[in-house]
C-alpha cells in the first residue's frame, strides 16, 4: 500500500507539473501577447514610443520577458561603484538619434548593447519622433533590451516560489533587533485577554501565530502559499488570498492600534505585513503604528470565494448522494417498472437538456416560487443558497441514479447471486449483503472528488446566480487575460484532482477487502 501511494503521489505531482507547463506554453508562447491590452485603458491613451515602452513594461510584469532600460543599466553601474556622479549625469540621457550622442554616451550605449546582446537579449533603440525641433507627445527616444523567458525557466521559478517560509531576515531594511517574541496576552486585545501569539520583527508578517474568533480559530503565517499575483482580476493580490479573503461590507470592531489609539475600525491587525517607510508616509499611520507593519487586511461580513463555493458544493454533494443512491436502488429493484421508467425519464431529461438551459429554467421556476435568484453577499440568508444548491445537485442525482442502477443490475445477473439463491439466502439478504455492497464500490470512489471538487466551485451555476465563488474566478481571469490567475487556479484544480483520485483509491480499498494495492512477487 505504501509503495502504491508513493507511486501515485509522484506520478500525480508529475502530472500536475505537466499540466502547468502546458498551460504556460499555451499562454506565453501560443497566445498573442497583444491580447492583454484589449481592456487596458492606459494602453489606448499612450502613443508613439511611449506605447512601445508601456507594452514591454507590461509584458515583463505579466511574465513574458525580461526588460532592462538603458537608465537601469547606468543606475546599476553607479550603484556598483563603477561610475561616479559626474559620469552618471553625463551619460544618463541618450540623444534623439544615434548621431546626436556625445562621444561618452556613445561609449556607454555600445557597452550596454554589447553586454546584453552577449546575454541573449535583443537591444532596441527608438529614435525620437519630432515635429520640427519639438518632440511629439510620447515620442521621446528610448533604448532598452529584452529577452523572452523560456518556459522551463518560468516553470522552475514558479514552482520553487509556491511555498515560502517567513523568517526574521525577510525584511531587508534596518529595523533594529530581529527576532521572535512569544506572548500569552496578545497586544491586539490590549494585553488583557489570554490569547497566545508569536510576534516577529524582521519577518514579513508581524503575527506568525495567533488566535481569533474566525474559523479555524488558530492561524499561522510561518508558511505561505503563493499561486501568483493577479494583474487585473484582483490587482496586486495573490491568487491564494483572492480565493481565501473575506468579501462583503466592512465589519468594524473596537481596535487597539500599536500606538495605543483605540477606535472603531475594520483593520485586522493580526494580518499586518511590513511595508518599507510606510509609517511616516501618512499622518494616519503615524497616529496608529509604531513601526512599518502597517499593511492590513480588513474584516468583512461575508465568506471568501472558496467559502461560498465549498458551502454550496458540499451541501449539493450531500443532497445528491442522499437522493441519488436511494433512487438508484429503487430503480434497480423495480427494473422495467413504473419507478424505473420515471427515473429513466428524469435521467434522460438531465442528459438531453444543456446545463445552461436547465439552470435558467430552474432559476425561472425558483423565482416564481419566491426564492432569491441573485446572490447578494451582505444580505445572504439561507434562502439565497437554495437555488444554487438544488441546481448543482440535481444533475449529480441523475448521474448517481444512472450508474448505481447499472451497477446493481450487473450484480443481479452475476453467478454469485445465483449461487446465493441456491444456498437458500433470501432476496433481502442477497440484496443487502452482496448486491448493494458490491454495486456502491465504484460510487464510493467518487466521494472524495465530489467533496474536494466543492472547493473549485461551479462555473455555470455561480455565474447564473451571481455567487461570488471560485468557479467564476477562472473564467474571469481568462476573459481579462490575467495569466497569473489562470496558472494559479489551474495548479489548484490539478492538485485537488490528484488528491481526490488517491483518496478515492484508499476509500475503495478500505470498503472492499478484495482490492489490494500491494504488488506481490509470483
Image (cartoon, helix red, strand yellow):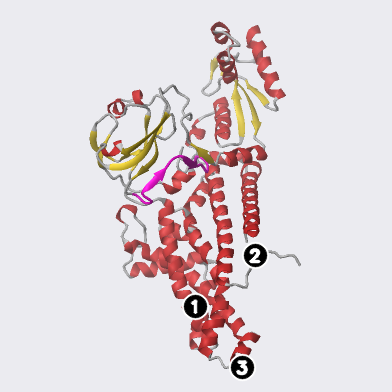
Image coords of residue 365 (percent x, y): 38, 70
Question: Would you say the residues marked 1 and 3 are in contact, meaning their CB atoms lie under 8 Å apart?
Answer: no
Helix, strand or loop status at disc 1: helix
Question: Would you say the residues marked 1 and 2 are in contact, meaning their CB atoms lie under 8 Å apart?
Answer: no
Q: From what the image shows, is residue 297 above or below residue 202?
A: below
Q: Which residues are magenta?
A: 214-230
Answer left or right for 443 relative to 222. right
Q: From what the image shows, is residue 406 above or below residue 93?
A: below
Helix, strand or loop status at disc 2: loop
State the predominant SS element of the stretch in magenta: loop
How far separated are the C-alphas under marks 2 and 3? 33 Å
Location of mark 2 (residue)? 517
Helix, strand or loop status at disc 3: helix
- Camera-near label (1 vs 3) is 3
Confirm whether the magenta stretch covers residue 218: yes
Image coords of residue 48 (percent x, y): 56, 27
Where residue 238 is drawn, which disc sits there?
A: none
Check disc 3: other Cα within 10 Å, few if <14, some if 14-19, many if 20+.
Answer: few
Location of mark 3 (residue)? 422
Earlier in the chain: of badge 1 and badge 3, it is 1
Location of mark 1 (residue)? 346
Amino acid at each position: 500500500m505504501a509503495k502504491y501511494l508513493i507511486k501515485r503521489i509522484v506520478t500525480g505531482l508529475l502530472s500536475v507539473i505537466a499540466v502547468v507547463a502546458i498551460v504556460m506554453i499555451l499562454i506565453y508562447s501560443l497566445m498573442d501577447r497583444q491580447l492583454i491590452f484589449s481592456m487596458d485603458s492606459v494602453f489606448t491613451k499612450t502613443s508613439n514610443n511611449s506605447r512601445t515602452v508601456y507594452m514591454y513594461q507590461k509584458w515583463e510584469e505579466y511574465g513574458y520577458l525580461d526588460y532592462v532600460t538603458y537608465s537601469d543599466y547606468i543606475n546599476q553601474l553607479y550603484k556598483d561603484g563603477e561610475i561616479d556622479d559626474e559620469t552618471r549625469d553625463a551619460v544618463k540621457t541618450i540623444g534623439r538619434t544615434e548621431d546626436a550622442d556625445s562621444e561618452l554616451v556613445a561609449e556607454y550605449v555600445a557597452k550596454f548593447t554589447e553586454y546584453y546582446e552577449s546575454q541573449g537579449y535583443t537591444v532596441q533603440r527608438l529614435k525620437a519622433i519630432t515635429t520640427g525641433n519639438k518632440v511629439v507627445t510620447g515620442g521621446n527616444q528610448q533604448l532598452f533590451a529584452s529577452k523572452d523567458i523560456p518556459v522551463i525557466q518560468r516553470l522552475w521559478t514558479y514552482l520553487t516560489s509556491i511555498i515560502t517560509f517567513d523568517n526574521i531576515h525577510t525584511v531587508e531594511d534596518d529595523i533594529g533587533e530581529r527576532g521572535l517574541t512569544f506572548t500569552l496576552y496578545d497586544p491586539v486585545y490590549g494585553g488583557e485577554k489570554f490569547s497566545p501569539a508569536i510576534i516577529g520583527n524582521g519577518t514579513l508578517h508581524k503575527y506568525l501565530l495567533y488566535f481569533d474568533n474566525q474559523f479555524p480559530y488558530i492561524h499561522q503565517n510561518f508558511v505561505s502559499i503563493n499561486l501568483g499575483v493577479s494583474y487585473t482580476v484582483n490587482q496586486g493580490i495573490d491568487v491564494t488570498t483572492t480565493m481565501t479573503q473575506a468579501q462583503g461590507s466592512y465589519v468594524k470592531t473596537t481596535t487597539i492600534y500599536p500606538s495605543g489609539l483605540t477606535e472603531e475600525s475594520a483593520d485586522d491587525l493580526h494580518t499586518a505585513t511590513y511595508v518599507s517607510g510606510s509609517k511616516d508616509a501618512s499622518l494616519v499611520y503615524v497616529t496608529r503604528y509604531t513601526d512599518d507593519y502597517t499593511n492590513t487586511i480588513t474584516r468583512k461580513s461575508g465568506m471568501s470565494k472558496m467559502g461560498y463555493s465549498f458551502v454550496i458544493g458540499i451541501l449539493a454533494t450531500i443532497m445528491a448522494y442522499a437522493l441519488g443512491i436511494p433512487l438508484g436502488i429503487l430503480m434497480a429493484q423495480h427494473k422495467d417498472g413504473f419507478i424505473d421508467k420515471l427515473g429513466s425519464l428524469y435521467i434522460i431529461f438531465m442528459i438531453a437538456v444543456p446545463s445552461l438551459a436547465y439552470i435558467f429554467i430552474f432559476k425561472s421556476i425558483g423565482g416564481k416560487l419566491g426564492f432569491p435568484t441573485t446572490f447578494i453577499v451582505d444580505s445572504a440568508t439561507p434562502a439565497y443558497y437554495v437555488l444554487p444548491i438544488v441546481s448543482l445537485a440535481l444533475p449529480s442525482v441523475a448521474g448517481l441514479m444512472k450508474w448505481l442502477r447499472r451497477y446493481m443490475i450487473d450484480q443481479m445477473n452475476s453467478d454469485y447471486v445465483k449461487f446465493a439463491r441456491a444456498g437458500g439466502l433470501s432476496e433481502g439478504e442477497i440484496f443487502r449483503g452482496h448486491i448493494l455492497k458490491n454495486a456502491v464500490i465504484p460510487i464510493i470512489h467518487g466521494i472524495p472528488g465530489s467533496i474536494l471538487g466543492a472547493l473549485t466551485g461551479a462555473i455555470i451555476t455561480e455565474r447564473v446566480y451571481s455567487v461570488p465563488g471560485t468557479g467564476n474566478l477562472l473564467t474571469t481571469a481568462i476573459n481579462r487575460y490575467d495569466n497569473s490567475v489562470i496558472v494559479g487556479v489551474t495548479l489548484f484544480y490539478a492538485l485537488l484532482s490528484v488528491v481526490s483520485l488517491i483518496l478515492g483509491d484508499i476509500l475503495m480499498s478500505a470498503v472492499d477487502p478484495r482490492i489490494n494495492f500491494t504488488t506481490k512477487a509470483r
